[in-house]
Image (cartoon, helix red, strand yellow):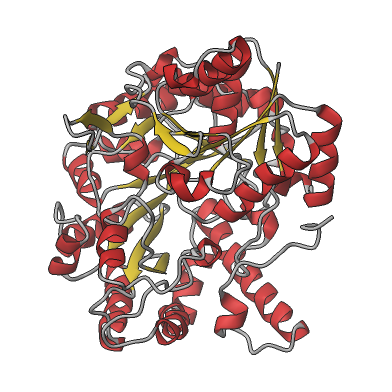
């Protein structure tokens, strides 16, 4: 039997070209490897790097006639297009079993299944569940025997018990990079260069930030007597040997030398960080790498001598969820485990001791108490941290999170059209600013951060990676300006800077 995994045609942020988004979706190669190991003929169609539009996707599904079609989405961003792909699959291959995975569909199950063209929702980790579900369908077994799925039977929603997390990540097969058309990914000359490739060594997180859906998918679950599920954050990792062997495969077979780790919390385990760094230094594969990290763990690893080895092993880009300068705001987001002082120490350590490392931080704005002055304080704080790049994002209530529940109960969510959940478009108003005012002011934040001195410092860096990132920023800035002129839109207004836009091949 045949499984087709689909990443559908998708829109892009105007400030990032479609080519800059071509990084391999890890969920596809991980699920493909598990299905193939279980004997299923498996294909992937990632439409963006192939420039496969909706008409072409329909033809490919009709030609190959898969028995199962799967999509995934965690953060609502492309949920609408993922659902459209399953609807399309049912239209051109009526006999196909359609499966939606990821946190978003798990937490919008009733709404998702009501469409009528989604047969099953796979919740939590997918490798074992997907294979078990396909085996059940193949063998005529009752789907209620499959853990961690949600489906509709006779108009009633049925959710099976959660599957325990995979204890040994090394037991999973190597991701199926060989069927992923690796030559199409990570080809930007400047962004994540040279040769960008995604990878992960860990799953889950030890925190339960109220706005974040990432940890939900990989949490431990306890089911109470009344059926209510209690989630507890959980972090697991592959071994150093497994991770380094995967890097070796990417570097030597596919010439991918810039690794983009997609872990939620890369640097949780200091001992693992140290062993990994030393192993990678010893291998001498010529790779550089990027990771999402926590500020307090960076400070810890500097104090215990591990951070220096991480940099020597190729760490060239760090992104930290700073989120806010105000301690009360951090605590209200569930991030009371470190303060703005910790973020300051973290980034000043990187600036002063490891100047070749690209320093990126993310900030959450547009909260219920937001004012223009509090938003400006975020810019001032980003300057104080001396970042290479600050990402200012409006708080986005994602289904399943505490923020979603709180905002929904209070009637603060002003749209539930998930096509607007693009992490640039505000979803709520504050007590002092409308959604539109927050959106307009967001653009001013980035403009106020940028300066000639900031750019010259980056473009003259002795780090080739850091220079390329600044060149990339300059190129895309001119691209946005030129595109705005063509569309007769004033550059860096809401219309030119935000909202997802279709690439030219989207409908082909």
Indicate the position of residue 74 as horizontal and vertical percent values: 46, 46
Residue pictured at 28% horizontal, 58% vertical: 405
What is the number of callouts on the image?
Answer: 0
Indicate the position of residue 17 as horizontal and vertical percent values: 67, 62
Indicate the position of residue 18 as horizontal and vertical percent values: 68, 58
Which one is in front, 492 or 221?
221
Q: Say left or right for 87 vs 249.
A: right
Depicted 266 relative to depicted 81: above or below: above
Residue pictured at 32% horizontal, 71% vertical: 382
Residue pictured at 60% horizontal, 81% vertical: 495
Depicted 316 relative to depicted 145: above or below: below
Q: Say left or right for 259 vs 496.
A: left
Q: Say left or right for 496 vs 62.
A: left
Q: Quadrant of the N terminus?
A: top right
Q: Quadrant of the C terminus?
A: bottom right
Q: Is residue 265 visible?
A: no
Depicted 135 relative to depicted 262: above or below: above
Depicted 244 relative to depicted 292: above or below: above
Q: Is residue 107 visible?
A: yes
Indicate the position of residue 15 as horizontal and vertical percent values: 60, 69
């Amino acid at each position: 039997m045949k499984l087709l995994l689909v990443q559908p045609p998708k829109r892009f942020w105007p400030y990032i070209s479609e080519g800059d988004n071509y990084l391999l979706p890890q969920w596809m190669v991980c699920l493909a490897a598990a299905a193939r190991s279980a004997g299923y003929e498996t294909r992937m169609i990632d439409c963006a790097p192939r420039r496969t539009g909706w008409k072409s996707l329909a033809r490919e599904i009709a030609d190959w006639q898969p028995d199962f079609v799967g999509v995934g989405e965690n953060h609502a961003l492309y949920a609408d297009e993922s659902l459209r792909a399953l609807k399309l699959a049912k239209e051109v291959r009526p006999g196909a079993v359609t499966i939606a995975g990821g946190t978003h569909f798990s937490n919008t199950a009733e709404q998702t299944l009501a469409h009528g063209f989604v047969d099953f929702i796979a919740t939590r980790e997918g490798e074992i569940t997907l294979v078990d579900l396909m085996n059940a369908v193949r063998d005529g077994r009752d789907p209620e025997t499959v853990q961690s799925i949600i489906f509709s039977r006779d108009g009633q929603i049925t959710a099976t018990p959660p599957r325990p997390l995979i204890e040994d990540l090394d037991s999973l097969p190597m991701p199926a990079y060989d069927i992923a058309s690796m030559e199409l990914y990570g080809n930007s000359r400047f962004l994540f260069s040279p040769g960008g490739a995604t990878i992960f060594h860990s799953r889950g997180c030890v925190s339960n930030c109220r706005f974040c859906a990432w940890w939900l998918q990989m949490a431990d679950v306890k089911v109470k007597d009344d059926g209510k599920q209690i989630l507890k954050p959980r972090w697991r990792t592959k071994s150093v040997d497994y991770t380094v062997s995967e890097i070796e495969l990417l570097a030597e077979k596919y010439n991918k030398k810039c690794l983009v780790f997609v872990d939620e919390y890369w640097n949780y385990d200091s001992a693992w960080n140290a062993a990994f760094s030393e192993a990678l230094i010893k291998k001498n594969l010529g790779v550089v790498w990027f990771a999402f990290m926590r500020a307090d763990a960076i400070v810890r690893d500097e104090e215990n001598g591990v951070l220096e080895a991480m940099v020597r092993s190729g760490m060239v880009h760090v992104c930290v969820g700073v989120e806010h300068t105000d301690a009360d705001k951090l605590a209200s987001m569930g991030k009371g485990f470190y303060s703005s002082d910790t973020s300051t120490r973290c980034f000043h350590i990187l600036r002063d001791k490891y100047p070749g490392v690209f320093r990126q931080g993310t900030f959450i704005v547009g909260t219920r108490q937001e004012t223009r002055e509090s938003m400006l304080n975020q810019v001032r704080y980003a300057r104080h941290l001396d970042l290479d790049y600050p990402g200012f994002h409006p708080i986005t209530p994602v289904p399943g999170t505490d923020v979603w529940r709180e905002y929904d109960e209070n009637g603060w969510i002003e749209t539930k059209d998930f096509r607007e959940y693009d992490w640039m478009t505000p979803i709520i108003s504050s007590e002092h600013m409308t959604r539109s005012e927050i959106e307009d002011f967001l653009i001013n934040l980035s403009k106020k951060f940028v300066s000639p001195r900031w750019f010259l410092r980056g473009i003259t860096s002795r780090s080739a990676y850091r220079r390329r990132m600044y060149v990339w920023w300059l190129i895309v800035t001119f691209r946005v300006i030129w595109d705005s002129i063509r569309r007769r839109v004033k550059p860096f207004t809401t219309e030119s800077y935000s909202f997802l836009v279709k690439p030219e091949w989207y409908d082909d």
